[in-house]
Amino acid sequence: MSALADDPFHPDGIAGFASRLRRGETTAEAVTRAYLARIEALDPHLGAFEFIDAANALAAARAHDRLLASGTDLGSLMGVPVAVKDILAVKGTPARAGSNLDVADLIGGEGAFVGGLKRAGAVIVGKTKTAEFAIGRGGVNAVRGTPKNPWAHADHVIPGGSSSGSGVAVAAGLCRFAIGSDTGGSVRLPATHCGVFGLKTTKGLWPTDGVFPLSPTLDSLGLLTASAADAAIAFSALGGRAPIRAHPGPGLRLGRPKDQFFDRLDTEVAACVEVALARLGRAGVELVDVEIPGTADMPACFDHMVPAELITNLGRARAREGLDAMDPVSADRVGAGLALAAGDYVAAVRRHRAWREGATSIFRGLDGVVAPTSPSLPSPVSEAAARADDPQLRRATSVNTVPANMMGSCATTTPIHAFGSPLPVGLQVICPGGAEESALSIALLLENLFGPPPRANVERGGES
């Protein structure tokens, strides 16, 4: 393999690039070219991208360089290359939602969030792959391709879904950060399985016009980043907020669920979580046992709500006619939606509303709830595909992520595999809805305590 261009943001992240850019030591065009070179070298093997928008990315980067030279500074994301999940419309690019069916009418034109991303100065280098219709916790997509997790070279293990390409792109250094969506874990699972940081925002915080509507009741947008520091900068820039600083540690109270969150953990996951929680304790963080009522029922309610709303959006005729052209995972979920009784959907929505309203009491006296993001390490793609039609096994994948969506919360996942796992492990912190700044403050504390995680060996992956 020929020499691979270095990740131009490593190791000092967005903050370091912003300083170098304004000192005239680099340009937006230079870093965009570096990432495009990495995409050209690595993505034929990894398959993270659905569409690479090199010409428009370079044009935007040059425009930002001219603006900065003329005295116009758009802020901390100016000139930062970003990838966007292919369920969001970006002008001049296709929007497929991971499907061979034409669903462009459901996505519509470029929405307010992508518009805000551009106004903040981010340079969109392309669209990342997704599980079809943003369904699929493993990130497997038999019709548009499953990205290869850069953490496993001998075996093709799941990248996590549904924002699979976004997780792989960030882990492999093909962009500085990526946009994903999270309906039941679709930012946090790929972030966890690819060993990067993930932020799931509160439903409604960021607009979802111009986004494929999987479940309008639950859909939210989020960030997959190389670090919590990058996520904090991006979040503040996109909302015009003040910089977020790390929580000092003492005085922080985090709930440790007594429910299913710590059940049936892989050995490596349990070991890493134990070390992480011990470090929090030594830093003065108080860990408090907490009960979250109904968590055992949440995945089943999720499996009633989401397929029903997907069918409503697709339309029953298009859904039936397109079944044979769908990925088996999404076809199974669409079939379940077609067969679902209206009463089951209504009951699930009522349970969701009750959990969301009851979340206030769960978080009373707590800054958040901490638990493993996923109970298991990323499994082989072949195994994930074989068990895709088993609802119990499927629910086990996202048993720890669905509750945040059902409670209307925000959440982060921080990589902790440095504490004893060959494959990535994530530690999730769930905070009340609307408390993203607090969640990121806690995440910055975790990053300071845990240190930077090991990075995937992408050069080795490119050779295989």
Image (cartoon, rainbow, N blue to C red):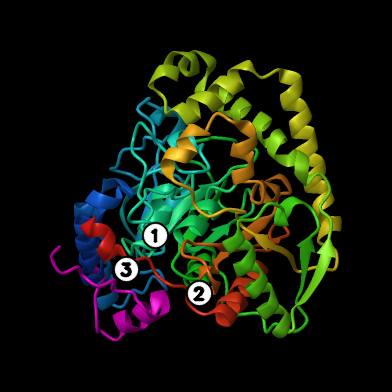
Q: In terms of sequence position, does the residue under pointer 1 or pointer 3 come before the other?
A: 3
Q: Is residue 313 visible?
A: no
Residue at (63% x, 43% y) in the render: 396
Q: Which residues are magenta?
A: 1-28
Residue 79 numbered mark, or none: 3
Q: Is residue 199 visible?
A: yes
Residue 291 location, quadrant: bottom right
Furthest residue in direction left, as rendered: 2
* Residue bearing the label numbered 1: 151
State the residue in front, 230 or 389: 389
Q: Residues within 10 Å of mark 2 (few under 14, many from 20)?
A: many
* Label 2 SS: helix
Position of residue 122 measured from the top left corner of the image (x, y, whole percent): 36, 62
Residue 229 numbered mark, or none: 2
- Residue 350 falls within the magenta-colored stretch: no
Q: Choose mark 2 or mark 1, whichever is in front.
A: 1
Position of residue 176 measured from the top left corner of the image (x, y, whole percent): 37, 65
**Badge 3 amino acid:** Gly
* Label 1 SS: loop
Query: What's the CA distance linking mark 2 and mark 3?
Result: 17 Å
Q: Choose mark 1 or mark 3, whichever is in front.
A: 1
**Badge 2 amino acid:** Ala
**Badge 1 amino acid:** Trp
